């Protein structure tokens, strides 16, 4: 096990901060940060540019210029060694004369993992791996998951009353949670490639599914539907040309994507009426369509289906200061699970903001 | 507004700690702490003894002895000036020669509030009021409430899954919450005069309703029932002679208390079949029976009835790491409330322990 100094940790921490800062803007690429250090001084830093633009390593090398020769690089992910939309980063690192490189974690793709590292080592560069690796993986947990499983990473978020309802008996759900919590939801939306809701939520709330802070382009919008019917006066329908807008149709037939050029809506026909199978096909299609992370905001039917399909990779439960005694359940399963066989959350964090709270974790399925 | 020094705050804080330390053991008396200071040094301290024993002031005076002459006393509640089970504290304070007294808050009983203070002032003692008054009132919120309303203070506690259920479809509720949270429940039980559950919970869980830490005597046990039937093999029935055990019977007829000497069970017949009215009569009877704080641990029917009757004075919701999709609702109301008319929690605190969380606050009824 390589020993890292406190200075090493501090530089890698800076690289992680750079990665976090661009999270959401690099999709479907991972958000990566790189820092170049010489004589204990940062001489270059960079983060991944939006898709098609330079990766973090190249941005940092550009800042460092000829000073990079003989310097040390800290990077949050194993540098790429293949031609994608941009030439391989390993070549740029080698030709810049980097002497030592510290990598937070290997490329999660089992087909390429370690190849970048081997290429760097063959060029005589000293390579260390694993510094703040857990933290780095967390930033790109969606990317890591999707590259391995070939399915989009799905985050499910529900806003609940203290007694577990997402809406009252009349379907009203505004405003269960506080402005402070809603701000966090906007930040989470920003970090995902697409925002999705069920058709019931579309009908009840006519949501905009936009990000109101910190991102110039809106994420892709997705509606789950068992029919193709989307109200023409809905925000989704009226704005389908402004942002990529997808309706996922669960229906027996051919599995295909149909582009409606008149409205701008893309219909993804999953070709099956089985709710769980349809969701699995959806997650696979999303990955092939370069949508590797999806933020699902309900409603209850979609939530329960995704959990039953074991497709939720991260769950967020936001609790508002309300008790209503009866209403629309957040995760309505039929039948429910036994306590002993309930879904639990791994790596669970409970967080309090202005006395409101939310819980997040990785679902562990019975 | 009287100005208090940092030293004053520190001594009153000590008195509050003494009060908190005896909370639960002084019922139906309030838990009070007193500190006597001379030349910036504590020369006596005391807390309320169990009912019938000396109050905090007298315990502190006893420790201080003749040094109390000319000293300052810090006490968390206005000293009593009437003969109850013990002679008035005001007389003892005056005859000990206390020169100055700082009181956290007035006696909440509007019939006696201020009388103790006037008596002390007439004797030439300098009296200041209000130092850490909010904190002091919080310790005895149950006492303050009951002395004013002539009803027992009711704390409702529910242990919920993350999606709001108190048990699964089979009625199973063990163990929704973690050991760390269950420890807090035991501490809360200790602070109340009685522990109560509905007959459904009695049948399903056969609970012991005991305090497993920090208290020698068990609190009084209460079961809510619409009939008088208690299973003879239940822990409650078998141990009714060891601890005061009450069955509250909601039934039309005469309002009365019947002592069953054979079993040891006390039956409180509320004389009405109306669930809300029955609960109000119960809260009044409890107060007259010197039970001024009750810790109600469900089930759902009792919880919903108490909330509908607006009788819950403090609510605790404990959340365990489980999602079960369907089960027995924690607060089943028919019909539910609208979001805009939901019950909210005032002075709400969300607290995290070992990544488990609970919420507590004072219900605000629509």
Image: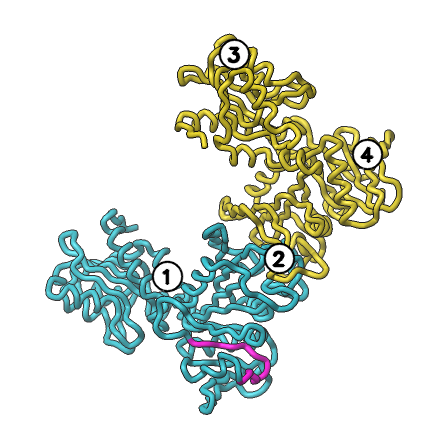
Chain colours: A cyan, B yellow
Task: State the separation of the CA atoms marked 2 and 4.
Answer: 36 Å
Q: Is residue B27 visible?
A: no
Using the rendered image, report if marks 3 and 4 lie on a common chain: yes
Q: In this rendering, would A152 be left or right of B61?
A: left
Task: State the separation of the CA atoms marked 3 and 1.
Answer: 68 Å
Q: Give the residue at the far bottom of this rendering.
A: A262
Q: Which residue is mark 2?
A: B342
Q: Which mark is residue A63?
A: none
Pair 2/4: label in front: 2
In x, y percent, where is residue A341?
62, 57
Give the magenta range.
A220-232
Pair 1/4: label in front: 4
Q: Give the residue at the far right of this rendering.
A: B253
**Chain-order first, disc 2 or disc 4:** 4
Q: Is residue B297 visible?
A: yes
User: Dot 1, crowdedness within 10 Å: few (<14), some or many (≥20)?
Assistant: many
Q: Chain of mark 3?
A: B
Q: Which residue is mark 3?
A: B97
Task: State the separation of the CA atoms marked 1 and 4.
Answer: 61 Å
Q: Secondary structure at mark 1?
A: helix
**Chain-order first, disc 2 or disc 3:** 3
Using the rendered image, report if marks 2 and 4 lie on a common chain: yes
Q: Is residue B13 magenta?
A: no
User: Dot 2, crowdedness within 10 Å: few (<14), some or many (≥20)?
Assistant: many
User: Dot 4, crowdedness within 10 Å: few (<14), some or many (≥20)?
Assistant: some
User: Dot 3, crowdedness within 10 Å: few (<14), some or many (≥20)?
Assistant: some
Q: Which residue is mark 4?
A: B266
* Marks 3 and 1 in Cβ contact (< 8 Å): no
Q: Chain of mark 2?
A: B
Q: Is residue A230 magenta?
A: yes
> Residue at point 41% right, 70% down?
A211
Pair 3/1: label in front: 3
């Amino acid at each position: 096990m390589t020993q890292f100094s406190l200075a090493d940790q501090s530089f890698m921490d800076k690289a992680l901060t750079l990665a976090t800062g661009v999270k959401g803007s690099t999709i479907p690429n991972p958000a990566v940060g790189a820092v170049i250090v010489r004589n204990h001084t940062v001489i270059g830093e960079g983060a991944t540019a939006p898709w098609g633009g330079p990766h973090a390593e190249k941005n940092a090398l550009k800042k460092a210029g000829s000073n990079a020769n003989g310097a040390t690089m800290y990077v949050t992910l194993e540098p790429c060694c293949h031609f994608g939309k941009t030439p391989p980063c390993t070549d740029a690192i080698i030709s810049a004369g980097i002497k030592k490189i510290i990598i937070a974690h290997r490329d999660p793709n089992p087909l390429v993992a370690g190849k970048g590292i081997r290429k760097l080592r063959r060029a005589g560069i000293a390579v260390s791996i694993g510094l703040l690796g857990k933290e780095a993986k967390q930033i790109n947990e969606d990317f890591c998951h999707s590259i391995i499983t070939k399915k989009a990473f799905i985050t499910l978020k529900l806003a609940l009353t203290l007694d577990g309802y997402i809406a009252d008996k009349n379907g009203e759900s505004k405003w269960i949670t506080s402005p402070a919590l809603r701000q966090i939801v906007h930040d989470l939306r920003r970090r995902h490639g697409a925002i999705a809701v069920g058709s019931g939520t579309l009908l009840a709330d006519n949501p905009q599914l936009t990000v109101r802070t910190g991102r110039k382009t809106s994420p892709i919008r997705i509606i789950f539907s068992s029919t193709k019917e989307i109200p023409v006066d809905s925000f989704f329908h009226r704005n389908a040309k402004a942002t990529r807008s997808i309706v996922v149709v669960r229906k027996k037939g051919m599995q295909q994507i149909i582009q409606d050029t008149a409205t701008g809506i893309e219909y993804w026909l999953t070709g099956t009426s089985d709710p769980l199978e349809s969701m699995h096909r959806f997650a696979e299609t999303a990955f092939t369509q370069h949508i590797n992370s999806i933020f699902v905001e309900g409603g209850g039917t979609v939530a329960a289906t995704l959990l039953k399909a074991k497709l939720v990779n991260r769950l967020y439960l936001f609790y508002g200061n309300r008790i209503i005694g009866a209403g629309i359940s957040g995760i309505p399963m039929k039948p429910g699970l036994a306590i002993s066989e309930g879904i639990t959350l791994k790596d669970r964090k409970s967080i309090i903001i202005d006395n409101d709270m939310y819980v997040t974790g990785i679902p562990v399925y019975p």
